[in-house]
Image (spheres, rainbow, N blue to C red):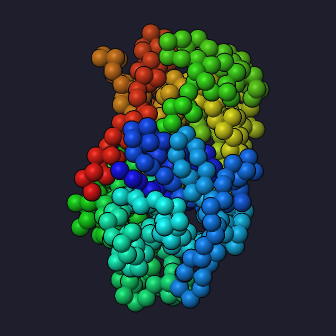
Amino acid sequence: MKVLFAAAEASPYIKVGGLGDVMGGLPKALVKKGIDARVVLPLYSQISEEFKKSLTFLKSISVPLGWRNCHAGIFVGIQDGVYYYLIDNEMFFNRQRVYGEYDDAERFAFFSKAVLEILPYIEFKPDILHVNDWHTALIPVYLNAFYRSLDDYKKIKTVLSIHNIEFQGKYDPLILGDIFGLDITQKNILMYDNCINVLKGGIESSNFITTVSETYASEILDPYFSFGLEGILKPRSYKLAGIVNGIDTDVFNPQTDTFLPYNFSVENTRNKSLNKKKLQKELGLKEDVTIPIIGMVTRLTPQKGMDLIKEVINDILSQDVQFILLGTGYAEYEDFIKYYEHNHNDKVRGIIAFSAEMASKIYAGADMFLMPSKSEPCGLAQMIAMRYGTIPIVHTVGGLRDTVTPFLPETKEGNGITFQSYEGWDMLDAINRAVELYYNKDMWRILKKNAMQTDFSWDNSADKYIKLYNEI
């Protein structure tokens, strides 16, 4: 079985969010199971010089896109047994950002066309072309429009994974010809709600659609979660399935994490307390391991539940707790957390940045990990937190529902604390229950062990993808 992934980001080369983690972890897991899995991504200027130097140049080709031909340099690198092909074009990818440029439609249309054009030159004929989110959703559209009659492309099957349905690639219909290089015969595939919708085109054109958790696959059939696409997905639910993401347990490993002052394991968690005290010292908080630390590593957006935090922050801080948040996002939330840090300097730290090192220290040093997302297709942070023995407090939505099981003291089963309704006081009740449980040291020890022993590796998910690929 040969599988070629196409994505806008892939760890370790470039990572903006969860998609980058998936494209670093899933292909590696598939290769370990005997699948020839490879990845194509853009060669962004932000990729480190260390990684750029590790690449080998293969060939330059010309990619037809409507009325023009665009240069594409093909580079290859190998990470953990996985071949990564990187497409170079200075005009499209020498930018300050991966996403959010004025010409994203043209940038990712070029990349999508280039993925198909490079296949003869990399000498790889995939059985499955697995594309991800709207940035590569044009690939199955282009495949059906221009390549199906060619011998090398006839048998290729396509899978589209939706990591976050909120982002759909909506554009004015005028770009169909000049920018996308498509004609009127393909217009109906892409048109939806009076505009071009790239994700909709991918949904229509792909052989199968996956999402990143079983619950999210059901949720996106509901108008509350679908961002307008329920009318497209419901009639195609026969080709829709959810497979929960895993995490790279080699990368997120408290026994080997080089960012941690002290490594630890489920068999010996004593050093977790030392990491906690070190974190308190580094951030200028009271060094007292008996005080519960609530941590967050998140984007500061409404989707991540920041409105709930604002609603009940005073009630949270009325308890003997410390609250540490790492992330960036909307200015109103950044200002909010800095205001509370200033006015509650003995309890609150807001680190407005992204730092993999600080994230690891919070995962390892905190006692609880708050994740009150309004929607969460899968979520990785709750799984990473549990790997480090930090108990998640989550809203039961999307992948949070699929990965966090509420702890029941009566049976001593479960790996986290949950709340059902997206409401500030319900979240506060969950925090209060977690704090109360924290002081029951025997129960907390059992809960912590349950969390750390939960298997979030890519192994099970990879098996499900292999089964799906074979069925397709």
Q: In this view, does 276 lie to the left or right of 187?
A: right
Residue 35 image offset from top left, x and y in percent:
39, 45
Q: For the image shown, how many numbered marks are present on the structure?
A: 0
Q: Which residue is drawn at 42% across and 15% down?
A: 446
| Residue 2 image point, x, y percent | 39, 53
Q: Which of 211 and 131 is in front in this view?
A: 131
Q: Quarter of the image holding residue 31? A: top left
Instruction: State left or right for residue 193 relative to residue 370.
Output: left
Q: Nearer the viewer, residue 39 or 121?
A: 121
Compared to residue 283, the image places residue 335 above or below, namely: below
Residue 176 pos. (x, y %) = 48, 84
Tell me the residue at 39%/35% (across/down).
459
Q: In this view, does 405 lie above or below 55?
A: above
Residue at 48% x, 31% y is 392
**Image position of 452 (left or right of 361):** left
In the image, is residue 442 above or below residue 24? above
Would you identify the image quadrant in which residue 145 lies?
bottom left
Whether residue 106 appears in this view of the structure is no
Image quarter of the C terminus: bottom left
Q: Where is residue 347 in the image (x, y as percent from the top left)?
A: 68, 29
Residue 81 appears in the picture as rendered: yes
Point 76% across, 38% down: residue: 342
